[in-house]
Amino acid sequence: MNNLFLLVFLLSMVLLIIGLIKPSLVIRWGDTEKRGRKQVFLTFFGLAVVSFIAFGVTTDNKKATSSQSSSQTTQAPAEKPSVKTYKPGQYKVGTDIPAGEYVAIAKSDAYIEIASDATGTMGSILANDIFLNRSIISIADGQYLKVQNGQLYAIKDAPKPQEKDGFLPAGMYKIGLDLPAGEYKIISEGGDSYIEVSGSSSHSMHDIISNDIFQGDKYIKVSDGQYLKIFRAKIKTK
């Protein structure tokens, strides 16, 4: 539409110039006495002004529409892939939850337990842990996993540990993923504190490399692939 108005504007200007030179060439209507330069000017100059304004309006509207469409295209937020989580409860591995390694996140004291069957007896418990903030656990098909006061994430989807003032809080961390390998200072938060380094996240007594109940400060050296667990203490990272 804006191209039509532009054509009308250009044609009006041409006819205006011709009419001012020789009005009879462009004015073919009305009384012969009124076919003068005044009539040419009023007719074609007015038409030129109207068509020029219309051209400008339609051009601006087209630009605005194009800009809005482009803005909507570029500003549309990308959809984030949903992260699967598991709320407190008991799960049969291989049926309710896939086998693998998981991170349990909690805001208060929480409990996780792996059992060999669903009898609920002490003899069926393969491993368990009472923890603060976060723990890591590996589970296999056929086992039963219980979670209390915590939420489970596959380890690849789990929220990253959050440092505060150069410290990580009590919890369990995978070296090489959550923390770089190296030597760390562990600071007790009062009373007896606990530290443990293990070779896996099975929570089996056989996988414990070292552990200690301590007070005050303690240093520990850890390697990639190991797991560091602390209770009532914090890790100095800087």
Image (cartoon, rainbow, N blue to C red):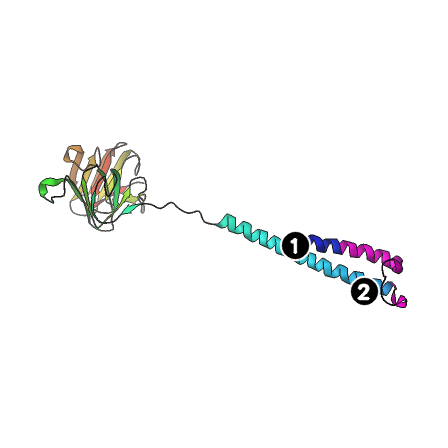
Q: Which residues are magenta?
A: 9-36
> Residue lying furthest front in this view?
29
Please tell me whether mark 1 sits on a helix, a strand or a loop.
Answer: helix
Q: Amino acid at mark 1?
A: Thr
Residue 6: percent from the left, percent from the top?
72, 54
Question: In percent of the image, x 62 and y 56: which residue is there?
Answer: 61
Q: What distance separates the C-alpha of mark 1 from that of mark 2?
A: 26 Å
Q: Is residue 214 visible?
A: no
On residue 42, the disc is: 2
Residue 155: percent from the left, percent from the top?
29, 40
Q: Is-magenta flag for residue 182?
A: no
Residue 101: percent from the left, percent from the top?
25, 38
Question: In percent of the image, x 73 and y 61: which residue is there?
Answer: 50
Q: Quadrant of the C terminus?
A: top left
Q: Is-magenta flag for residue 14?
A: yes
Local packing at callout 2 (Cα closer than 10 Å; few below 14, some 14-19, many 20+) is few
Q: Is residue 9 visible?
A: yes
68 sits to left or right of 23: left
Q: Amino acid at mark 2?
A: Leu
- The relative height of residue 79 versus residue 21 in the rendered view (above or below) is above
114 sits to left or right of 237: left
Q: Nearer the viewer, residue 201 or 62?
A: 62
Residue 78: percent from the left, percent from the top?
44, 47
Mark 1 or mark 2, earlier in chain: 2
On residue 59, the disc is: 1
Q: Quadrant of the N terminus?
A: bottom right
Magenta segment, principal secondary structure? helix
